[in-house]
Image: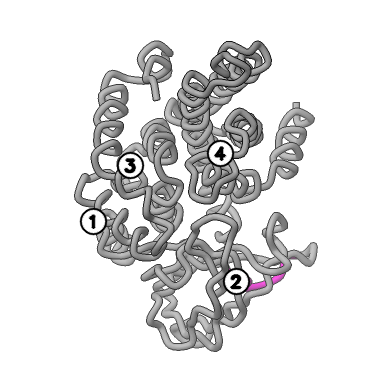
């Protein structure tokens, strides 16, 4: 992927531009050769990516440290580059951040430092356990409960669509500790180790793309009170702060996938001949390429505007992050669909790069807030004035 956007737009520092260059070289050497075969054993590939990212000291860009400024631009730059080669490597990177961000904000110091240090060096895999059967977009509908019993909380319930289920060493779990006056759940957050009695992985879920994900359950799982993240009732704002910080980076991952699709479409169209001419010489193909490039540029501008504002200390970037996530993920879907069309039958062959991108990109319009939810958030921010 050309780095002219990063070099020429004003969103980045010289350090971040250098980071983008070094990460691109690292991915070409370490990720791209492995991505070809990662679907043969997703779990093994995922663990390998964690190890590779840790050895390259890249996981620290996903894991916020207390007292240090967290760079959303760096997070986005790395996610975009990783997703260009491997959606699975991108997942391995970002989940270390999602699973630890609430801890960095509010966990007791000894709990926070223990897990953040292990996550940063790849010794432990993190997970973020919020979604339930009846609580997807409606976070406040969580039914998993945590009841105080002496010096511990007893957690009962289940979660589904939990990334890293079965691979994670610890989970940041959101559970109901009470009921608000309006009948909605009062949520609190806990760190739950994968070996705690009463915790188990109920099942792994097969998705359209390679993605370690599944259902987990808690049956009288006794969690020490000191493993609570923040205070009782802090769970919902912690979850929202996490989403607000990481949401723009979903758009960055979408841009990485879309950038790869555009590059593959250009290469294919300049080599494939139809009706005596290269595909790239046909005006309808040129139209598609022009639309793809324009949408990609627009998506990247929205993503890095949101990231820049967050890094600049703007108090709330809710609207900007939602616009970035909404537009970039929807645009990536259109760009990759155009790439499939340009490739014709070759784009439908199982294992073809474009076919894999077509499967990989679809989830981005759903996780961390569906496109429909992003529209509601944007409208809400507009109507607040």
What residue sits right under mark 4 in the picture?
346
Local crowd size for mark 4, using a 10 Å CA cut-off: few (<14), some (14–19), many (≥20): some
What residue sits right under mark 3 in the picture?
32
Q: Where does residue 314 sit, x and y in percent of width and height?
A: 51, 28
Is 128 within the magenta? no
Front-lying residue, 202 or 278: 278
Mark 1 and mark 4: Cα distance apart in space: 40 Å
Mark 1 and mark 3: Cα distance apart in space: 22 Å
Q: Is residue 293 above or below residue 111?
A: above
Q: Where does residue 218 sit, x and y in percent of width and height?
A: 54, 82
Local crowd size for mark 2, using a 10 Å CA cut-off: few (<14), some (14–19), many (≥20): many
What residue sits right under mark 1 in the picture?
121
Q: Where does residue 104 sit, x and y in percent of width and height?
A: 38, 53
Residue at 27 percent across and 49 percent down: it is: 53
Position of the N terminus, as image quadrant, is top left
What residue sits right under mark 2 in the picture?
159
| Front tag of 1 and 4 | 4
Mark 2 or 3, nearer chain start: 3
**Magenta-colored span:** 175-180
Q: Is residue 318 visible?
A: no
Mark 4 or 2, nearer chain start: 2
- Circle 4 SS class: helix
């Amino acid at each position: 992927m050309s780095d002219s956007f990063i070099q020429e737009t004003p969103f980045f520092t010289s350090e971040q531009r250098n980071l983008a260059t070094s990460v691109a070289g690292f991915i070409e050497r370490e990720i791209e050769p492995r991505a070809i075969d990662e679907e043969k054993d997703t779990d093994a590939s995922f663990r390998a990516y964690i190890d590779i990212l840790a050895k390259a000291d890249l996981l620290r860009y996903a894991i916020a440290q207390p007292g240090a400024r967290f760079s959303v631009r760096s997070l986005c730059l790395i996610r975009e580059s990783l997703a260009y080669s491997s959606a699975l490597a991108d997942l391995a990177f970002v989940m270390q951040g999602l699973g630890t961000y609430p801890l960095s904000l509010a966990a007791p110091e000894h709990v926070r430092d223990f897990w953040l240090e292990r996550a940063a060096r790849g010794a432990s895999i993190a997970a973020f356990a919020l979604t339930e059967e009846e609580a997807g977009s409606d976070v406040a509908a969580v039914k998993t409960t945590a009841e105080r019993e002496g010096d511990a909380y007893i957690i009962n319930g289940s979660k589904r669509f939990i990334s890293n289920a079965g691979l994670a060493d610890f989970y940041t779990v959101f559970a109901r500790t009470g009921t608000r006056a309006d009948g909605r759940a009062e949520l609190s957050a806990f760190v739950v180790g994968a070996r705690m009695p009463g915790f188990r992985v109920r099942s792994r879920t097969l998705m359209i793309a390679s993605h370690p994900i599944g259902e987990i359950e808690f049956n009288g799982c006794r969690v020490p009170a000191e493993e609570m993240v923040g205070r009782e009732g802090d769970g919902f704002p912690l979850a929202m702060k996490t989403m607000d910080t990481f949401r723009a980076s979903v758009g960055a991952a979408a841009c990485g996938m879309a950038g790869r699709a555009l590059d593959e479409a250009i290469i294919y169209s300049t080599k494939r001949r139809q009706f005596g001419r290269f595909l790239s010489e046909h005006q309808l193909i040129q139209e598609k390429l022009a639309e793809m490039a324009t949408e990609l540029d627009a998506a990247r501008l929205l993503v890095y505007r949101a990231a820049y504002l967050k890094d600049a200390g703007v108090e709330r970037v809710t609207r900007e992050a939602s616009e970035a996530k909404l537009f970039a993920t929807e645009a990536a879907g259109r760009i990759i669909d155009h790439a499939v069309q340009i490739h014709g039958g070759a784009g439908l062959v199982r294992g073809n790069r474009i076919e894999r991108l077509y499967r990989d990109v679809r989830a981005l319009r759903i996780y961390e807030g569906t496109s429909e939810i992003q529209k509601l958030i944007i409208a809400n921010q507009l109507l607040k004035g």
